[in-house]
Image (tube, grey):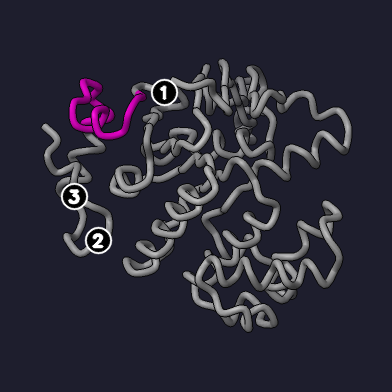
Amino acid sequence: MPDPILSLRDIEKSFDVRSGHRLRSGADTRQRVLKGVSFDLAAGCCLALVGESGSGKSTLARIIAGLIRPDRGDVVFDGHRHSDRRDRQARLRLHKTIQLIQQDTRGALDPRMRVGDQICEAMAIHRIGTRAWRRTRCAGLMARVGLDPSLAVRHPGSLSGGQRQRVLVARAMSLAPRLLVCDEPTSALDVENKGMFLDLIQTLQREGGLTVVLVTHDLRVAVRLADRIAVLHQGSIVESGATLPVLRHSTDPRTRALTAHLRSGFPSSDPVPASLGQAS
């Protein structure tokens, strides 16, 4: 495997789940969400993080994106540790090179701001170009993700779910990141918009050598996009490797349960290829 651009070592994370009863009883109020998670990812590859609800996928994605800090362990991206963010410049560098696309398009976009302003905002924060240059780049980014640039003056509430998802991609790509973290990006999209979104991410990867970490509960999306897969269960990686070999020849009962659900529970009209249907 080539030298990794992203390395995680022994990531641990707990959250306070205290209740009134636990406070009175003095019981432990910390719940471990991630337990010693480690992996490497090469530049230009896509890793799918899969698992049942509550397995720690989204928490891990936010740690990779630098939005929350682990209790223990190291995240190293392009030679820089997340824990090295001691000054504003280090934080800005991190958030410029790693961008997150969230699941909730309504919550991720400010309903009071025009979408063009939101795409330009990150560039303004990082002092990239002049205002006129940023407007021109905004139009180019919107066209690149399949949006009419005239929609820049619209507010998010007047756009469809698929259009809002593309605005999030354009906003993320405005900083030319090297790593894109996608947290359940297709879960709220219909079949047509899901297929277009997956095509868009594949194009961005092919054209720009983008590295992607994809959180998904849909293994067909993982088969479509991901070179590698990591299956999480109760905060630990129970199986990982090249996507199709892991899913076709898994010996772990948690992974086999996920693939059984995949083969039996989805319509044939979905745009994701049925290559996993050969799994044993």
Q: Nearer the viewer, mark 2 or mark 1?
A: 2
Figure quadrant of the C terminus? top left
Give the residues drawn in magenta, as a range: 240-256
Residue 119 placement (x, y as % from top left): 70, 65
Q: Earlier in the sequence, mark 1 or mark 3?
A: 1
Residue 270's disc is: 2
Q: Earlier in the sequence, mark 2 or mark 1?
A: 1
Residue sitting at x 57%, y 45%? 180
Which residue position is annotated with label 3?
A: 274
Amino acid found under the numbered disc labelled 1: Ile
| 3D distance between C-alphas at marks 3 and 2 | 9 Å
Depicted 96 relative to depicted 104: above or below: above
Relative placement, left or right, of 192 versus 18 is: left
Q: Give whichever of 96, 257 is nearer the camera.
A: 96
Which residue position is annotated with label 1?
A: 237
Residue sitting at x 75%, y 24%? 83
Callout 2 touching callout 1 (CB < 8 Å): no
